Image: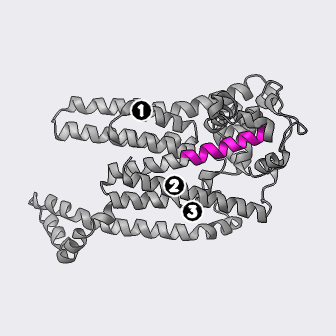
Amino acid sequence: MQEAERSVLRLAILSRFLLLTLIITWRSLFPPYDSSAHLNPSCLSSTSDASLAEPADVVLWPRVGAAIEGSVVWDGVYFVRIAECGYEYEQSYAFLPLLPISMALLSRSVPAACSFAPLIRVIGYRAVLALSGYALNNLAFVVAAIYFYRLSILILKDSRASFLASALFCFNPASIFYSSVYSESLYALSSLCGLFYLFFGSNAMSMLLLCVCGAARSNGAINAGYICFMSLLQSYDAIIQKKSAKLAVLPIVAGVARSICLFIPFAAFQAYGYYNICLFVTSDDLRPWCKSRAPNLYGYLQSHYWGVGFMRYFQVNQLPNFLLASPILSIATASIICYGDFLQQYLQPLRKRACMATDSMPCQLESERLFSGSNSSSKMLKGGNTLLVG
């Protein structure tokens, strides 16, 4: 590991330490807004992992276990419940299985030296599941930060810009989700590792990791766009450099096949939900989405239980959330505008050379208009490489 990577590693660990300290301090001073963590009914199935749970009077440190369980809020409650009891309710299918499976494995199935299983008698099984989620996500984030830096070096070819980008990743405003029992950390790790190996040229490893990414979050399938981009680059190279139309077809076919593979984890999980919810009930008890020609479990859950839909978030009662996000939204908007202005200046020489290669009078006039201020543009280009890669 290079010195820069060790610096990124230290930054990532420091950011987790600071964030966890803030979380513990805040929770000790104020009760959580979401109180659903303390609602812990028995699992519906007697064959679930809940049989590993110890009675309250057997647990050695019940208060510690209760504190850990109480720290799990919002979506984390679903992930812990799924890891403990499986997919019992319709709305639980909105949460993909990678994190719950990983938590359950770390809690009981891996070798004892690497498992939290010995702690079940100390703090209880549900607390061990939560502790496994915290450990997994924080470790995954640290490794993801290192691969974020490696990917940035591979693409930007600028160590300073890559380090600054990695530092911002470690201290980004949404950083709390990477240290909670949420799926963001595993998604970030698998997607960043997959993209690194994709641009590094290891197609098999990148496909495996990006498929794993699709089992963490539903938007993992959109990573197919990167595969399509690489396929187009290879086709362009075959046409322009190698002058072969046949060679240009092969990357397109391979890219389409690989992109389809990225949708398999999400599609398989939706089929699993359809199998459990729709196949073993009478027609009178069928859920509305089961009756559609193309059953869309995930879309129905997001709309029915969480009110998610196109433009449905833009409501007056969401104004406080927009105000809360306004600083980072302003910075992001200003960065996009700044980058767009510089990109236009950067591309002008290419447009000028394209015009000079033709005898078109309108093109020549457009070239003269664009480069009437060429002196200022050239000064920007000399000092703009860092801005471009950032």
Residue kind at label 3, given as amino acid type: Pro
- Residue 171 percent coordinates (x, y): 53, 61
Query: Which residue appears at 68% of the width and 47% of the height?
Result: 303
The tag earlier along the polypeptide, 3 or 1, is 3
- The vertical placement of 309 against 25, above or below, is above
Give the foreground label among 2 and 3. Answer: 2
The residue under label 2 is 12
User: Rounded to the nearest whole Å, what is the CA distance between mark 2 and mark 1?
Assistant: 25 Å
The residue under label 1 is 205
Q: Quadrant of the C terminus?
A: bottom left
The residue under label 3 is 173
* Residue sitting nearer the eye, 305 or 145: 145
Give the foreground label among 2 and 1. Answer: 2
Q: Is 209 in the magenta? A: no
The tag earlier along the polypeptide, 2 or 3, is 2
Region of the chain picked out in magenta, as a range? 125-140
